[in-house]
Amino acid sequence: MPPPAKRRKASASKAAAPTTSTDLTTPTEPTTSSSATNAYPGFDPWHATLDIDAGDNKMSVFNTTKSQFMHSAKIYDSDAFKLKPLTVADGPLKGRHVIMLEPINDFFRFMDFPPEIRNIVYDMLFQEAEDIEIVTFKSKFSGQRAVRRGFKRQSKHPGDTWNPQKSNWEHQTPSVHSLLKTCQQIKEEAAPVAYGSNRFSFNGLPELKAFLSGIGTMRQFLRQIRLVYGSYHHTVAATTFHKLKDAKDLQSVTFPHDMVCGDCRPERLGRKSITIRDVLVHTKPFLKAFHKAQKSKDDPVNVPDIICVAPETWPRFCEDGEMGRSCTCTYLGDPSSCRERLQHTKEVQVDFRKAVADELGIEVTSSKEE
């Protein structure tokens, strides 16, 4: 609970003597002359920011509609408050009207909600219908880090200003993930939702490595990971998959067809041929750790079942192909139809899962498909 705000009083006359401010974000320096203080004993200058509509003379104006004098001002303070009009009952200022900023203490604490309600809030805040696409960003002023796709686009940050020295947006609204930094209990409750209820999508292994390095211990909550494009980086593959050893609750790791299929004509795509066995060299330590973790669970996951192979994202499959019907589509000169390409991808997935099972010495007990 935030500490109660200090009560401040402002006289309807010049007791407060604030300075009019045009910068509503930075408090103005109050008048501290001894004459202002001596004129109103018992009152100190008001350290607050005001924006007074009536101009520098601070005079009220006559409202012909209500036949009354009126004055308007905007008051800014670092703590939540409500205005309370009072009349001074005693002393030299007896009869004067003052407006007091009274701190608001009657709010409801979020942690007083039952866990079921808090979980509903976490779901509303963190769950996303689409994949969370992660890319890397690097500038000469900062190291490479993982960011969401569109991080540098102005359209994603309306009203914000890009700071090239800090490589970040100034005045941007805090990310919803800032909630995880409020306290340990909220972090323990919300992190499984933030990282476990969404699928994270990456262009390739460098982006996945940067993401896994950046989230640290949050890796344990990951459930769905998807690699989109077929480029395979041997130099980062081993360290990337090693970091996945912490993700003991994974449900799916999706590889693109082009990455694990040695028959996908990589020479036409300008890439070196990679086979399932090549990928297993780097993923074996992670898969073994995942398999070991499942032995102590009441509802263990069959390790080969988490391996998925998805068709390439371009070109799109036609409606006939997706429905299992014949078509006349071609891909990079390959006469195979969309239906044949989809069927081939399923066959590669079966081969990949069998290779994983053979490597770990277990049986494939499910034909689960993505």
Image (tube, rainbow, N blue to C red):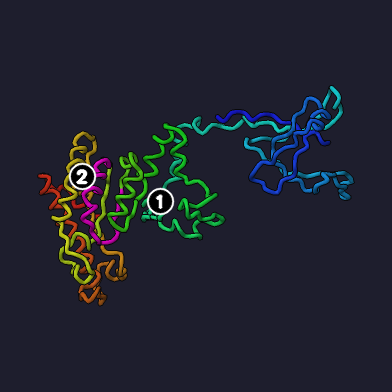
Quadrant for residue 76, please give it: top right
Quadrant for residue 8, please give it: top right
Looking at the picture, tell me which residue is in the foreground, 368 or 121. 121
Q: For mark 1, what is the residue? A: 142
Q: Mark 2 belongs to which amino acid? A: Phe
**Residue 213, image x and y in percent?**
32, 45
Q: Mark 1 belongs to which amino acid? A: Ser
As measured in the structure, the alpha-carbon distance from the residue carrying label 2 to the one carrying label 1 is 30 Å
Quadrant for residue 152, please give it: bottom left
Residue segment shown in magenta: 224-247
Tell whether 322 sits left or right of 152.
left
Mark number, residue 210? none
State the residue at coordinates (28%, 67%): 323
Tell whether 163 sits left or right of 216.
right
Q: Secondary structure at mark 1?
A: strand
In the rendered view, tell whether residue 328 sits above or below residue 8.
below
Q: For mark 2, what is the residue? A: 286
State the residue at coordinates (44%, 35%): 186
**Residue 225, image x and y in percent?**
30, 51
Q: Contact (CB < 8 A) between labels 2 and 1?
A: no
**Residue 41, image x and y in percent?**
81, 25
Is residue 225 covered in magenta? yes
Is residue 166 covered in magenta? no
Looking at the picture, tell me which residue is in the foreground, 159 or 294. 159
| Picture quarter with the N terminus | top right
| Picture quarter with the C terminus | bottom left
Q: Secondary structure at mark 2?
A: helix
Looking at the picture, tell me which residue is in the foreground, 293 or 329. 293
State the residue at coordinates (26%, 45%): 244
Residue sticking out furthest to the top: 90
In the rendered view, tell whether residue 233 sits above or below residue 185.
below
